[in-house]
Amino acid sequence: MSIELRHIRYFIAVADKLNFTEAARSLHIAQPSLSLQIQDLERLIAVSLLQRNNRSVKLTPAGEVFLVEARQLLKQADLAVANTLKANRGEIGELCIGFIYVAAKGFLPSVLNQFHQQYPDVMVNIKHMSNVDQIDALQNNQIDVGFTRVFNTNAYADLLADCITQDTLMVAVPENHPLASQSSFLPEQFKDYPIVPYARAESPLLFQQVWEQFGPATFTPHKVIEPYMLDTALMLVEAGFGITVVPGCARFIYPQGVKFLPLDFLTNALNLYLVRRKDSIGNPNIDAFVKLVKSEASLESEAGLKSEAGLKTVMA
């Protein structure tokens, strides 16, 4: 037989009341049963904790020390239960998120704010990662969710993805560029201007859809500068180093110094996926975060449609 929490609770009740009858009444048990439990506790630790006779009960010096430790032990046990319940509700723990900046910039700050307000004790770790690196990190349990443009259901049977936003590709040119007054961009115009071929490393899907799709027969770059980050590519465009192709959402995070022209001949949507491991379903932290993302992405999509309609009206 070993010491159990009931022994601790019973001893504290007697120590507080210094009366077995009153302690038994507060515990809703019979007084003889309480006396036997205290005797069992003293036998287990081989120490007398109480001095009692027919008229009084008081703590021994050892009992006073044990009372301090017993209160701490009971407090720790209650805390363990409380934290376990919080973890089950997704209120504590850690959430690690991988993302590509330009795609998630529109809604991720709002989602993180809402998540922090609802689950302030969950530690959130965000990592800027390339599309390919996110998939590897998910499969290796280095991140819990990812925002990526690359996902193939057949290739990643252990992962689950939801398409949360769709975007289009646009050409970014300097504001004072000869093409800046155009309403759209034609493929044959690529051969006339220097190219900043963004995204081979960070977004190979984007690179494949644009630079490799058009091929050298469509355009011949005068200069080849290949920055890793989209912000860097747009800064080079603004500085006059050339033009580049970016997701349409870039115009909302880089609104000045650069003009964005639709690629009307490209009809394929550029999807953004929220990806997680299938075995993470049921994890309360991840489930709560995914729910917030889907809600926020839906609101952003509605706002984006309104902004797009307004932009088309102005251009018309």
Image (spheres, rainbow, N blue to C red):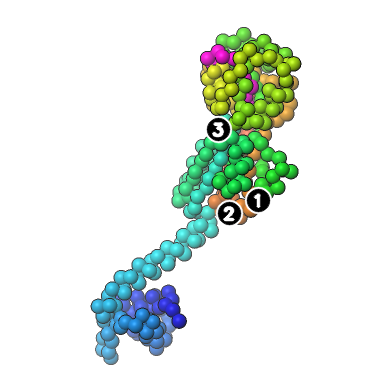
- Estimate the spatial distance between the alpha carbons at disc 2 and disc 1, rounded to whole Å: 10 Å
Q: Residue 183 location, x and y as percent? A: 67, 15
- Residue sitting at 61 percent across and 18 percent down? 224
Q: Earlier in the sequence, mark 3 or mark 2?
A: 3
Q: Which residue is mark 2?
A: 283
Q: Residue 90 location, x and y as percent? A: 53, 54
Q: Amino acid at mark 2?
A: Asn
Q: Which residue is mark 1?
A: 278
Q: Nearer the viewer, residue 93 or 225?
A: 225
Q: Nearer the viewer, residue 45 or 95?
A: 45
- Residue sitting at 39 percent across and 75 percent down? 9
Magenta segment range? 238-248
Crowdedness of circle 1 by 10 Å Cα count: few (<14), some, many (20+)? few
- Estimate the spatial distance between the alpha carbons at disc 1 and disc 3, rounded to whole Å: 24 Å
> Residue 164 in magenta?
no
> Residue 243 in magenta?
yes
Q: Is residue 260 visible?
A: no
Q: Quadrant of the C terminus?
A: top right
- Estimate the spatial distance between the alpha carbons at disc 3 and disc 2, rounded to whole Å: 25 Å
List the single residue furthest toward the top. Answer: 178
Q: Earlier in the sequence, mark 2 or mark 1?
A: 1
Q: Which residue is mark 3?
A: 101
